[in-house]
Image: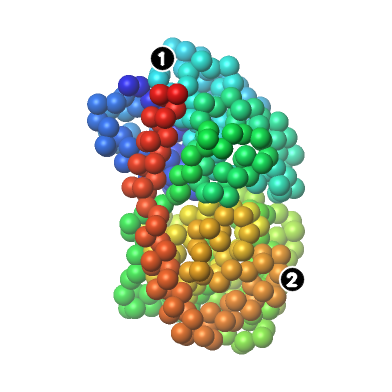
């Protein structure tokens, strides 16, 4: 059996949630299926870390797909030609995108349809491309995998896809996300947060992550409590807008917000386990990997009461209206003042996190791959 996989989002020290899910899932799938040939398809020379088994064949095709025009060339022409040549049993579109004219069976992994509901959060050319082509990808694919029941229902409702065609495959959390000793927490706080406790945000600094309301809520929390808790923001300023910048500049307590940029995996494990709480309140998420990472690390979670987040957290976190600065600020105050609540949420979070693992993700994805081939 020959399985072709879009691995162009495997980028050393630059992976977002989709890249992490590709790496963690296929590391396990490849290892468990040593007699299967996997063709990993990149748009640039891959780092050796991503060619982790002898049953992986690497194909590098151009152009580097980092713009809607180049997406069209790479997926619809270059990739289509390659699939004809290698005669794979299946192509897995790990970012949802597939060649529309291919005769190879396809499994499209659609993580969410944020662009359909909040097109204002993306540059014009990108949202135009997504809104035009994703309905076609969804209908062309032999099968679809997605990361939550919420996303499954959203795909059914938005694109009128038969629910029997869609598999729900939850994301997981690396086993290195786990609680750490108090002395280690103090060391990380000294290193990253001037020796003070900190709320944590992890993710790309994108408008849909709701940084504006998070910043305003943190400012309100600080002004009402005189707390010494900082806010640590971990992530690359890839989508840092003028509106986010202007909001930040107007904050009374902006000096208590610390931007780390992207950090190493080891640093992220340590920072997450050292946080006082995760404050992760996006407008829209297909899943939200930082939620599971935080619960696994033994820290409480404040997150949004919309889209997939209640499904992932259930009663193991404080759910807030992401559009309400007051609600987010009150949750911050509550998590700091109510020690019993914080302890309860930590214990519930550890239990909830056990529902998700990359092992489970890999097994379910493999089942979906076999269903697609056998269809």
- Rendered location of residue 159, percent (x, y): 66, 35
- Residue 300 or residue 372, whichever sits in front: 372
- Residue 146 or residue 77, whichever sits in front: 146
Q: Is residue 121 above or below residue 201?
A: above
- Residue 248 or residue 364, whichever sits in front: 364
Quadrant showing the C terminus: top left
User: SS at mark 2?
Assistant: loop
Q: Is residue 156 above or below residue 71?
A: below
Q: Is residue 118 above or below residue 63?
A: below
User: SS at mark 1?
Assistant: loop
Would you name the residue on which mark 2 appears? Answer: 250
- Rendered location of residue 330, percent (x, y): 63, 79
User: In terms of image quadrants, where is residue 307?
Assistant: bottom right
Distance, label 1 to label 2, CA atoms, is: 57 Å
Circle on res. 76: none
Tag count: 2
Q: Is residue 118 above or below residue 350?
A: above
Would you name the residue on which mark 1 appears? Answer: 87
Q: What residue sits 41% from the left and 52% below the top?
A: 172
User: In terms of image quadrants, where is residue 274?
Assistant: bottom left
User: In terms of image quadrants, where is residue 240?
Assistant: bottom right
């Amino acid at each position: 059996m020959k399985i072709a996989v879009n691995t162009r989002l495997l980028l050393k020290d630059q992976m977002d949630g989709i890249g992490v899910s590709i790496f963690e899932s296929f590391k396990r799938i490849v290892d468990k299926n040593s007699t299967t040939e996997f063709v990993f398809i990149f748009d640039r020379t891959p780092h050796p870390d991503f060619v982790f088994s002898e049953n992986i064949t690497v194909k590098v095709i151009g152009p580097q797909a980092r713009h809607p025009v180049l997406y069209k060339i790479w997926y619809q022409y270059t990739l289509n030609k390659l699939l004809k040549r290698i005669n794979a049993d299946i192509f897995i579109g790990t970012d949802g995108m597939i060649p529309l004219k291919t005769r190879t069976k396809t499994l499209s992994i659609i993580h969410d349809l944020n662009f359909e509901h909040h097109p204002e959060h993306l540059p014009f050319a990108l949202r135009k491309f997504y809104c035009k082509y994703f309905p076609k990808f969804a209908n062309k694919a032999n099968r679809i995998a997605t990361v939550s029941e919420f996303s499954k229902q959203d795909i059914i409702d938005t694109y009128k896809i038969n629910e029997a065609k869609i598999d729900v495959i939850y994301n997981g959390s690396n086993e290195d996300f786990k609680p750490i000793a108090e002395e280690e927490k103090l060391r990380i706080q000294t290193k990253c947060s001037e020796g003070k406790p900190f709320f944590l945000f992890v993710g790309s600094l994108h408008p849909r992550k709701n940084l504006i309301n998070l910043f305003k809520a943190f400012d309100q929390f600080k002004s009402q409590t005189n707390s010494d808790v900082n806010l640590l923001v971990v992530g690359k300023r890839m989508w840092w807008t003028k509106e986010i910048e202007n909001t930040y500049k107007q904050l009374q307590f902006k000096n208590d917000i610390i931007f780390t940029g992207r950090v190493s995996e080891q640093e992220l494990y340590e920072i997450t386990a050292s946080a006082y709480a995760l404050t992760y309140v996006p407008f829209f998420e297909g899943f939200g990997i930082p939620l599971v990472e935080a619960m696994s690390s033994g820290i409480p979670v404040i997150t949004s009461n919309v889209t997939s987040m209640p499904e992932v957290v259930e009663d193991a976190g404080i759910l807030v209206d992401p559009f309400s600065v007051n609600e987010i600020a009150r949750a911050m105050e509550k998590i700091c003042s109510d020690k019993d609540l914080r302890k309860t949420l930590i214990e519930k979070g550890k239990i909830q996190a056990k529902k998700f693992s990359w092992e489970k993700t890999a097994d379910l994805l493999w089942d979906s791959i076999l269903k697609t081939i056998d269809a």
